[in-house]
Image: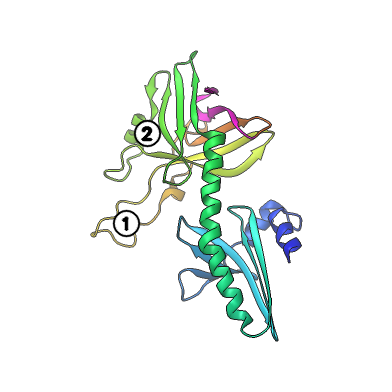
Amino acid sequence: MSRLGRAILNHELLSPALTRRWLKPFAQTSELGLSVGAPFEIFSLTHPRMISLYTKAGDFGRYSAMMGLSPDHDVGFTILAAGEGTTLTVMTLADLISKFLIPALDEAAKREAHDCFAGTYSSTATNSSLEVTTDDGPGLRILKWTNNGKDILDALSLIQLGPPGQGTELRLFPTGLKHGGRVSFRSVRPSGFGTGPSCGLLTRACRSWMLVNGSVYGALGVDEFVFETGEDGRAITASPRAMRVSLAREFQ
């Protein structure tokens, strides 16, 4: 089972595109946190963020087993049990894994992302800079972004009207595209129209997915970012593609 799980995560059975298509829900159950795939039972975790856990469980007499995959973290687990009450045992162990391991993996990923990408990137020739960090929120956060001396965050707040009171918060999320040391990210603004008591199902819904590539400059999305990394995986340069500039990372 472990070999099968690794083969799925490493795209050894199907291409990456077909694997992603395979790991999709086919139907929703009466429980919002559980959907059905082919053949997976897909559990949606909401803490520390929305994470899909793809599992396949089964019983045969006094034997029970489960395989679980978290594509977001590129890890999985298998549980094998024999004896009385093995179904409950397997489910309880899976509960513990999802409760403690997944948040720990997220925290480890955040630390790795901070080491690899956080910092200041600049170009004195064009008077441009980009400051990236990690915080309690998802992904990487852009603290400052200037191009030719102009504040891009202020400009984006004018052309992409965000939710009231959200300011100019902008975050970077990996797209999963990598090639030759180049890693692709997309910037995302806070979505929805608010979270107050007057907001309902539609007004507080996530709308970030509708804003991807929403602003284009010179046939390139303003939200496209590419980091050039070294052999150790740490970023060397950052390129906001629409600005046609490469910003060198400032190392301490």
| Image spot of residue 191 (x, y percent) | 38, 49
Q: Is residue 126 left or right of residue 24?
A: left
Q: Is residue 56 above or below residue 144?
A: below
Q: Which residue is mark 1?
A: 203
For numbered disc 1, what is the local secondary structure?
Answer: loop
Residue drawn at point x = 76 percent, y = 55 percent: 12
In this view, the residue in front, 163 or 249, is 249
User: Residue 235 lies in what quarter of the image?
Assistant: top right
Looking at the rendered structure, which numbered label has been put on residue 34? none
| Three-letter amino acid code of the residue under disc 1 | Thr
Residue drawn at point x = 48 percent, y = 14 percent: 124
| Image spot of residue 32 (x, y percent) | 45, 70
Q: Which residue is mark 2?
A: 156
Is residue 246 located in the magenta-colored stretch of the structure?
yes
Judged from this view, the residue extending furthest toward the front is: 83
Is residue 56 located in the magenta-colored stretch of the structure?
no
Q: Earlier in the sequence, mark 2 or mark 1?
A: 2
Assess whether mark 1 and mark 2 are in contact (beta carbons under 8 angstroms). Answer: no
In this view, the residue in front, 90 or 50, is 90
**Residue 218 seen in the current view:** no
Residue drawn at point x = 55 percent, y = 47 percent: 108
| Three-letter amino acid code of the residue under disc 2 | Leu
In this view, the residue in front, 181 or 135, is 135
Q: Magenta span covers which residues?
A: 233-252
